Amino acid sequence: MFENLSYAIVQLLHNFGAAAVVGIAIFALYPAAQPVPIQRGFAWLVGIGWSVQALSGMGFGAVSYYFYEKLPDLNGIAFAALLVKITCAAVSIGIAVMFLRRAAGWTVEQRRAAWKLLIALGVTALTAAAFLRWFA
Amino acid sequence: MRTAYVLAASLVLGCYVPVSLAADASVVISSPVNGAKLDPKTPVKLDYEVSMGEKGDHTHLYVDKSEALTLRGLKGAHSIGTLSPGQHEICIKVVNKAHTPIGAQQCIKVSVEPTA
């Protein structure tokens, strides 16, 4: 009961984090590009979303270790998918931080490119998540 | 008061027994048997039967500590192809939805030797 609840809470955070990192990045550009102050707010949310993704991802391992003293057993395609997700999270957090620090001096095209990159990273991570789920 | 005791005992037993029965996950590899000698040219067919118990979700098949594939059936036969000459260990472990081994497993050791 407590074990299932622990996994469920971690999964809940991971799901909402996934929705946030993709949905907010898309909404920053489509259907219309948002003003810079609002984009900054979105960058905060995307950065927090990716941080939640990273922490909840570690949470799966932590819950497993707490209950079984073992980490999830991932090999081959599943392990590669996990590395892809970790890379997406690290790069995206970096872009979000750069956006918050420097985007005021960026051109419209540069800001647009940053959001498109964040969308691509979010979509890549979600795709990798499917392979991680079913190839392990 | 006595009725309350009976109801409480029924509740405890009613909750306890199914949980304890459902909690037992198990793995049986019926073929090849532990210690079997196999031909390097013949694909190894693994016959297995698994009970997921309360917490298991699927199984991982390992050949020499390396995960070969995921098994989702509870019972069946699966070919793992040919094995190189020498000693090999084949394991099936029950894992949960997070892919964490929950403890139920069976490992066998086989010896692959060219037949004369």
Image (tube, rainbow, N blue to C red):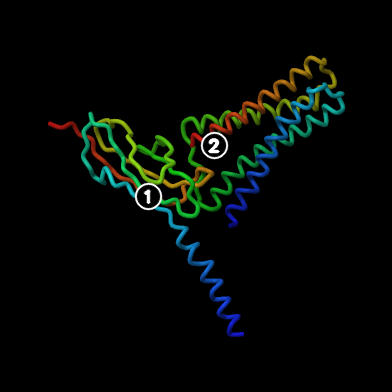
At label 1, counting other C-alpha atoms closer than 10 Å, the crowd grade (few under 14, some 14-19, many 20 or more) is many
Q: Are marks 2 and 1 in contact (CB under 8 Å)?
A: no
Measured as percent of width and height from the top left, residue B64 is found at 35, 37
Q: Seen in the image, is B34 located left or right of residue B8?
A: left
Question: Is the residue A33 above or below the residue B11 in the image?
Answer: above
Amino acid at circle 1: Val
Name the residue located 77 percent from the left edge and 18 percent from the top edge. Answer: A112
Identify the residue at image location x=32%, y=34%: B79
The residue where tag 2 is placed is: A133
Q: Quadrant of the N terminus of chain A?
A: bottom right
Camera-side residue of B2 and B96: B2
Where residue B53 appears, as percent x and y from the top left, is 46, 54
In the drawing, does residue A42 fall left or right of residue A15?
Answer: right
The quarter holding residue B2 reads: bottom right
Rendering coords of residue B39 (x, y %): 21, 33
Q: Nearer the viewer, residue B8 or A75?
A: B8
In this rendering, do the residues under marks 2 and 1 share a single chain? Answer: no
Question: What is the number of the mark on residue B27?
Answer: 1
